[in-house]
Amino acid sequence: MLPQSVLISEVGPRDGLQSVKATMPTAHKLAWITALHDAGLREIEVCSFVPAKLLPQMADAAEVVRHAVALPNWTVMALVPNLKGAEAALAAGVHKLTIPVSASEAHSLANVRKSRADMVAEVRSIVAMSHERAPHIKVEVGISTAFGCTLQGHVADDDVMWLATELAEAGVHEVGLSDTTGMANPAQVRRLFQKLQQAVGPKMGAAHMHNTRGLGLANCLAAVDVGVTTFDSSQGGLGGCPYAPGASGNVVTEDLVFMFEAMGVRTGVDLDKLMAARVHLQTGLPNEPIYGMTPLAGLPKHWKTHTHA
Amino acid sequence: MLPQSVLISEVGPRDGLQSVKATMPTAHKLAWITALHDAGLREIEVCSFVPAKLLPQMADAAEVVRHAVALPNWTVMALVPNLKGAEAALAAGVHKLTIPVSASEAHSLANVRKSRADMVAEVRSIVAMSHERAPHIKVEVGISTAFGCTLQGHVADDDVMWLATELAEAGVHEVGLSDTTGMANPAQVRRLFQKLQQAVGPKMGAAHMHNTRGLGLANCLAAVDVGVTTFDSSQGGLGGCPYAPGASGNVVTEDLVFMFEAMGVRTGVDLDKLMAARVHLQTGLPNEPIYGMTPLAGLPKHWKTHTHA
């Protein structure tokens, strides 16, 4: 049983722009975000609040947030790795915070120099601070390396569920699972999200899939089959590749929207407008390859005129 | 419930080589086919028996078949569009014939200059001839444009099932469904293969999916979910693109095998050997782009050492 609609959560301006070396000029970012909004996207991760020394691509985070939240009827998120980032994001006016917490202890230490338990404590502080200063703000966590880790290899399901339960108890509104390393397969996706629903119930959050080995859409299909209704993806598959040139990072928003719309699952996104928004990536990051099969092939003939499902 | 194993039916030497302008030299074809056999593939479509004037890439069809059938423990197929081709294929020694029959009347007329009803009659002649001359030979049909047609647009499910039933009654051993135009979506794939199983029972054949809009693996996942156990694919996604450069044709064998093996569904294929076989594509068709995300990214760390499922 497919849902009538799903929420596509665009992560390109954060996850994508953060992972390329070049910095997209602020004016291009703002135009791109506006175009994504015009295409009908209703949730977007626009930036990270991290020290500009570490990520110069995100130095304009506050300005980007102020622009995005001025557009109506969508949820503007920022990634924050710690309490300090969360305070800056709230000050800028975001609607929602997203915090990455690794299921792999090795990745957690490498990525944020904190153990998983310390990250749970950090999340607890963020929730408390947010609740006090801005009680309407939602906090989500994406559990990274949930499907495997390039540092430690196998990640046990039990580790992921322990962490998900701790985070739900810490008061976050949503807990999603991220295939940070492109190691997930559809059987594993179904199994883990089913366990996640048992563990956190209605707090089950987004599937954040990568297309490293071409399984991105198949993994999203597996997730929707077991009740996931929010999907992270990135326009043009922006997200670079930790492995090899040509192997894209995040699931491509254009292809993901095409898949759901073709199945009759509504996304609210206008595919023509979405594909037109790629121009901002091309002009704002002229030397960066952008991906997507649907934009290359175009929409099928008669797309508008027959029942897609 | 996933099956314990699936059959990967490699179509690159036929579907792939037929769709590129360059002709792979025979010696390269033979070396490539041997490498695919070594990798553990157990079914392969090695050529078409069509006039060399129409498809010079397939002029060496008989020699290719003789080479392939000398390799042990696999099924060697040839595509035949008509009785004359079928006779030539049997004379060369193939194990199995595959006949394309369009569900779209417009595509049938454009592709083979015959109506669908005339093609059913042609299939009946081929089955009779094959039964008489070589009763051990299997005959399969792939119903092309089963999921939509670029000429006529929408293809009704009822048209596909009418044709499948006619073909099963004509005596073919297997009836598969082909997404010739890259228009299939997972909901449609599930629906049509479920109807196909109701219509032809154990004669349900292969899912032949294209990756035109990136949905190839998702469509294969959808098919395995409803009981399909044979999947056509092409090494390197060879198959060109009727739409645009960069948009590959067939599902990439390497990615498909990776998906199934990662899920714990056995294919019998050794992924390292399979990826090594790409060298024959690179040397035999030096100017042709070849696709595949898994070959670019490489296998995940610890691939051999942990349980894939």
Image (cartoon, coloured by chain):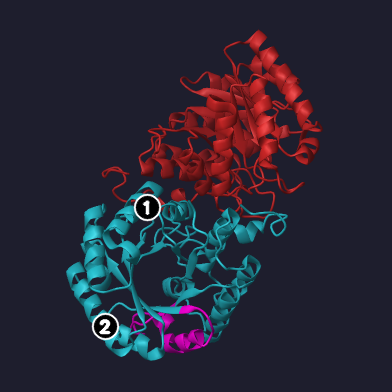
Chain colours: A red, B cyan
User: Looking at the image, is B292 positioned above or below residue A60?
Assistant: below
Dot label at residue B83: 2
Q: Relative to the observer, which residue lies in front, A49 or B162?
A: B162
In the rendered image, residue A194, in percent from the top left (x then y), is placed at: 54, 37
**Which region is colored magenta?**
B46-75
Name the residue at 45% across, 38% down.
A274
Name the residue at 56% across, 25% down.
A203
Pointer 1 or 2: first along the chain = 2
Q: Badge 2, how many Cα within 10 Å: few under 14, some, many 20+? A: some
Dot 1 falls on which chain?
B
Q: Relative to the observer, which residue lies in front, B185 or A293?
A: B185
In the rendered image, residue B198, in percent from the top left (x then y), is placed at: 29, 56
Dot label at residue A250: none
In the rendered image, residue B172, in percent from the top left (x then y), is placed at: 29, 73
In the rendered image, residue B32, in percent from the top left (x then y), is placed at: 56, 78
User: Looking at the rendering, which quadrant does residue B111 occupy?
Assistant: bottom left
Label 1–label 2 contact, CB within 8 A:
no
Asked whether residue A27 is in view, the answer is no
Q: Which residue is mark 1?
A: B189
Q: Secondary structure at mark 1?
A: helix
* Residue A142 located within the stretch drawn in magenta: no
